């Protein structure tokens, strides 16, 4: 059993990890440190390697090269069951022939803990997930959200050193998913266990993570706080994948918004673009404005506008814009401080 001494820094270090499946490169040169109490989300499109990375961390899949360590100890030769990590998979795979309580106590029974200890711990966890009243139900008698909470409790039962969650909420409807997000976050904050959660839902990542690891094609595009990824994306992929973005070529910026060029980093024109978020563009109604609104979508608290400006379509969000109509002439204003230069 991997049992770091008290006081050890419970940090996960992933260094230069690569994974090939025959000739297919699933992960290339992954470097990441997950700190002691951190909640990290692996975010990226389908097939980008999120589950592969999680399975390697769990010890369910061998890596092709690179190394992994936890609390300063090399994990290469530590089998999955001895890593002491709690895992919740994409489909909440509860044991169908066991009640909620038996599912939660499973890991402790495997470890041959005493019946009294198993009973106490199971009760504690049932309280934590607020399902004490359903302890004797079988999985088929529980809703999706309840099953997911039992799966989480089962992973927590063995006092994991690290929690690994693979899209644990994807099977749930929007409302339950939202409640579960809040719950997972609260449990993690309370227990202070480092957690890595896979998701392809950017909203989920923005809401939950201390840091987001944005992945693409088996590599890491950018790592940072939700604010950093949203406000300062470094690549076109991140700008596009996290939130809505308007991306402007350097040539277009040079022709129409030259004041943005001041903050332009060194590099090829073709390799750089400006990203500006819809809420950071100011729309000023002006009868002789050089832009025109081509569509307005009502979103409740605000309106999303499509605006044509110098042969480009912009998406702009404005406080509910009663005075503006499709066909209205406007002027758009972009402030350099709200624009980021990204690599293509
Ligand atoms: N055992 C395997 N053999 C060959 N290729 C595999 C294997 N497992 C995964 N892959 C490939 O590796 C890539 C990454 O897969 P992975 O399951 O990590 O993606 P993911 O990011 O979790 O996607 P999703 O969001 O759809 O779950 C995919 O192209 C997949 O087809
Ligand atoms: Mg996956």
Image (cartoon, rainbow, N blue to C red):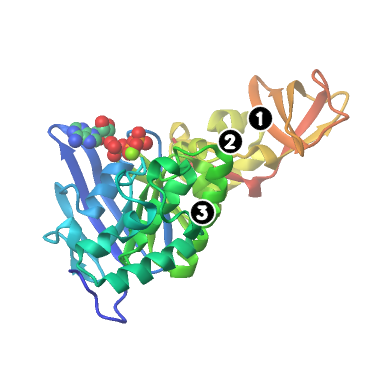
Task: Give the residue drawn at x 50%, y 42%.
Answer: 202
The alpha-carbon separation of the residues under discs 3 and 2 comes to 19 Å
Q: Which residue is mark 3?
A: 208
Query: Split into 4 quadrants, where in the image is the N terminus?
Result: bottom left
Apparent side of residue 92 relative to residue 111 in the rendered image (left or right): right
In the displayed structure, 38 sits above or below 26; it is below
Residue 168 appears at what percent x and percent y? 41, 46
The alpha-carbon separation of the residues under discs 3 and 1 comes to 26 Å
Task: Give the residue drawn at x 48%, y 64%.
Answer: 127
Residue 284 appears at what percent x and percent y? 82, 34
Q: Which residue is mark 1?
A: 315
The alpha-carbon separation of the residues under discs 1 and 2 comes to 8 Å
Instruction: Describe the element under mark 2 as helix, strand or loop.
Output: loop
Q: Residue furthest front?
A: 136
Apparent side of residue 209 relative to residue 92 in the rendered image (left or right): right
Closer-to-camera residue (173/51): 173
Residue 167 appears at what percent x and percent y? 40, 43
């Amino acid at each position: 059993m991997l049992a770091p001494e008290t006081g050890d820094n419970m940090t996960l270090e992933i260094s230069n990890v690569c994974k090939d499946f025959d000739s297919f490169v699933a992960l290339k040169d992954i470097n990441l440190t997950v700190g002691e109490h951190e909640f990290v989300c692996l975010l990226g499109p389908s097939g980008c390697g999120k589950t592969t990375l999680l399975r390697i961390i769990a010890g369910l899949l061998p890596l092709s090269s690179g190394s992994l360590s936890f609390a300063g100890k090399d994990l290469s030769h530590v089998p999955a069951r001895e890593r002491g990590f709690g895992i919740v998979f994409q489909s909440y795979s509860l044991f169908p022939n066991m009640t909620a309580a038996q599912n939660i106590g499973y890991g402790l029974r495997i470890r041959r803990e005493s019946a009294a200890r198993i009973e106490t711990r199971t009760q504690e966890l049932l309280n934590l997930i607020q399902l004490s009243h359903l302890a004797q139900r079988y999985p088929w008698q529980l809703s999706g959200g309840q099953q997911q909470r039992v799966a989480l409790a089962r992973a927590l039962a063995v006092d994991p050193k690290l929690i690994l969650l693979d899209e644990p909420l994807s099977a749930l409807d929007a409302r339950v998913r939202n409640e579960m997000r809040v719950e997972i976050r609260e449990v993690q904050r309370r227990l202070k266990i480092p957690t890595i959660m896979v998701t392809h839902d950017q909203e989920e990542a923005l809401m939950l993570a201390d840091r987001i690891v944005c992945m693409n094609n088996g590599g890491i595009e950018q790592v940072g706080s939700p604010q950093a990824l949203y406000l300062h994306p470094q690549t076109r992929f991140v700008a596009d994948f996290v939130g809505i973005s308007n991306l402007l070529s350097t040539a277009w910026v040079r022709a129409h918004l030259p004041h943005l060029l001041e903050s332009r980093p060194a590099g090829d024109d073709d390799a750089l673009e400006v990203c500006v978020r819809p809420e950071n563009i100011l729309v000023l109604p002006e009868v002789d404005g050089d832009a025109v609104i081509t569509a307005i979508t009502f979103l409740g608290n605000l309106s999303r506008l499509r605006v044509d400006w110098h042969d480009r379509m912009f998406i702009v969000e404005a406080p509910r814009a009663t005075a503006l109509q499709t066909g209205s002439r406007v002027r758009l204003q972009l402030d350099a401080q709200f624009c980021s230069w990204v690599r293509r």
